[in-house]
Image (tube, grey):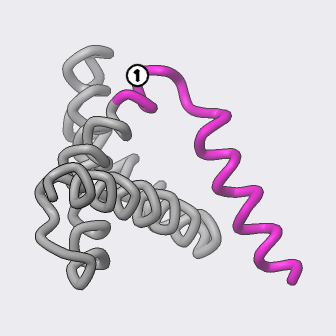
């Protein structure tokens, strides 16, 4: 039970500690993934692709808006990813999967 509480706290930390631009990037990616997804059988693949796009969008944002060195930032981000805990990765995956699933469900209901 403790593990579930830890994951829940990690999920809430994702949404409460991010800045507005990061949350907007998340929303755009989740909306796009939810609309593109063909059915619930592809939720895992869609979530994986959405997480990759979120990482790339954060990288592009840092290089384009903050003017950081692209090569150095890529190496730093890679090391940050390697140091990421399984709990954080699961939290991001669950948050994206649930949000994408909700968007897809709403889209399916509206289109009928």
**Residue at 32% across, 33% down:** 25
Regarding residue 79, the answer to whether it shows in the image is no
Q: Quadrant of residue 105?
A: bottom left
Identify the residue position indicated by label 1 in the image: 21
Task: Pinpoint residue 59: horizontal percent, then vertical percent.
Answer: 27, 38
Q: For residue 17: magenta?
A: yes
Tell me which corner region of the image, top left, top right, bottom left or bottom right, holds residue 61. top left
66 in relation to 99, above or below: above
Q: Which residues are magenta?
A: 1-24
- List x then y, in percent, for residue 94: 51, 67
x then y, percent, for residue 81: 44, 61
| Residue 107 image position (x, y, % from top left) | 23, 52
In the figure, is residue 59 to the left or right of 89?
left
Q: Quadrant of the N terminus?
A: bottom right
- Residue closest to the eye, 42 or 93: 42
Residue at x-position 31% and y-position 48% = 30
Q: What predominant SS class does the magenta segment belong to?
A: helix
| Residue depicted at 73% across the width and 62% down the height | 8
69 is higher (above) or lower (below) than 81: above
Residue extending farthest right: 2
Seen from the viewer's position, the closer of residues 39 and 59 is 39
Quadrant of image for the C terminus: bottom left
């Amino acid at each position: 039970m403790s593990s579930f509480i830890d994951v829940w706290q990690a999920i809430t930390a994702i949404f409460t500690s991010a800045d507005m631009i990061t949350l907007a990037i998340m929303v755009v990616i989740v909306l796009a993934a939810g609309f593109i997804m063909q059915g619930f059988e592809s939720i895992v693949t869609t979530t994986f692709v959405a997480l990759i796009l979120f990482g790339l969008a954060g990288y592009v944002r840092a290089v384009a808006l903050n003017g950081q060195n692209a090569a150095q930032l890529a190496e730093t981000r890679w090391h940050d990813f390697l140091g990421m805990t399984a709990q954080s990765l699961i939290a991001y995956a669950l948050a994206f999967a649930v949000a994408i699933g909700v968007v897809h469900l709403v889209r399916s209901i509206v289109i009928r």
